[in-house]
Amino acid sequence: EVQLVESGGGLVQPGRSLRLSCLGSGFTFEDYALIWVRQAPGKGPEWVGFIRSKTYGETSEYAASVKGRFTISRDDSKSTAYLRMNSLKVEDTALYYCIISSSYVDDAFDIWGQGTRVTVSS
Amino acid sequence: IQMTQSPSSLSASVGDRVTITCRASQGIRNDLSWYQQKPGKAPRLLIYDAFNLQKGVPSRFSGSRSGTDFTLTISSLQPEDYATYYCLQDFNLWTFGQGTKVEVK
């Protein structure tokens, strides 16, 4: 069974850092781009960023709202992707999901993790 | 790319035909998908590439396109369809619509 499991969320003060992890199983992790999406309480989902597979250079792209503060990386030997969040703001409070797209759905989001909650508050 | 989804909410009864629209700020070909989200759950893919029904999704769900306007149609609303629906463009990175909450009339 294809599965994504996020971890690392919690309560953090504004200005501090946090690193989220996304562990994949049931598929060849290195073949897939890894996408992060967040959803603030009572709001719609927002794309955060993604990292391409090694085949495509492991390069990453970010939403304007997090560019320069968030960094996505991956360790294919551990089937794990990371979202490093620096200079956290109250508005970064959200449930963070990691996602992969099966090849037949092009770039739609068909496999989601259960999410990990980040609360930024003093 | 901006996605404008409408309406933000609607009230409907079981058996009603429901339509939700997303308008893209520029051409996005057919690079649009639709999602259903219920409270406490991750969004669920319903439609990809504007028209294609995801595996396991009931055939009462369908997608269509006219230019930069995309529509999700539920032909006969069922009790389990009360939820919030989102569109997502993937032509240039990704942008979600604002969502449509389908409520009981």
Image: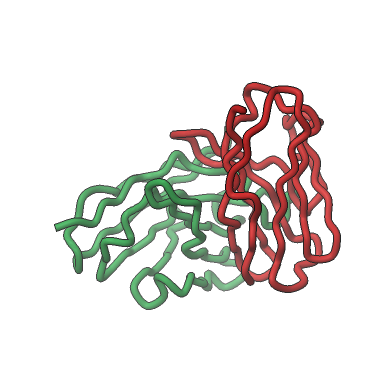
Instruction: State left or right for residue A47 relative to residue B49.
Output: left
Disc tally is 0
| Relative height, residue A82 to residue B20 (above, below) | below
The C terminus of chain A lies in quadrant: bottom left
Residue at the spot x=50%, y=51% of the render?
Answer: A44
> Can residue A78 be seen at all in this image of the molecule?
no
Q: Nearer the viewer, residue A33 or B32?
A: B32
Q: Nearer the viewer, residue B26 or A2?
A: B26
Instruction: State left or right for residue A82 relative to residue B90.
Output: left
> Can residue B10 be seen at all in this image of the molecule?
yes
Q: Nearer the viewer, residue A120 or B8?
A: B8
Q: Residue farthest to the bottom?
A: A68
- What sort of colour scheme is used for the picture? by chain
Residue at the spot x=73%, y=50% of the render?
Answer: A105
Residue A32 in the image: state x and y as whole percent.
Answer: 60, 56
| Relative height, residue A86 to residue B10 (above, below) | below
The red chain is B
Residue at the spot x=64%, y=72% of the render?
Answer: B1
Q: Nearer the viewer, residue B19 or A37?
A: B19
Residue A27 in the image: state x and y as whole percent.
Answer: 59, 43
Specify the quadrant of the image occupied by residue B102.
top right
Residue A33 in the image: state x and y as whole percent.
Answer: 57, 59
Specify the quadrant of the image occupied by residue B11.
top right
Residue at the spot x=67%, y=57% of the render?
Answer: A107
Residue B32 in the image: state x and y as whole percent.
Answer: 72, 57
Instruction: State left or right for residue B1 relative to residue A38.
Output: right
The N terminus of chain A lies in quadrant: top right
| Relative height, residue B18 to residue A71 (above, below) | above
Q: What color does chain A have in the rendering?
A: green
Q: Residue farthest to the left?
A: A122
Instruction: State left or right for residue B91 relative to residue A1.
Output: right
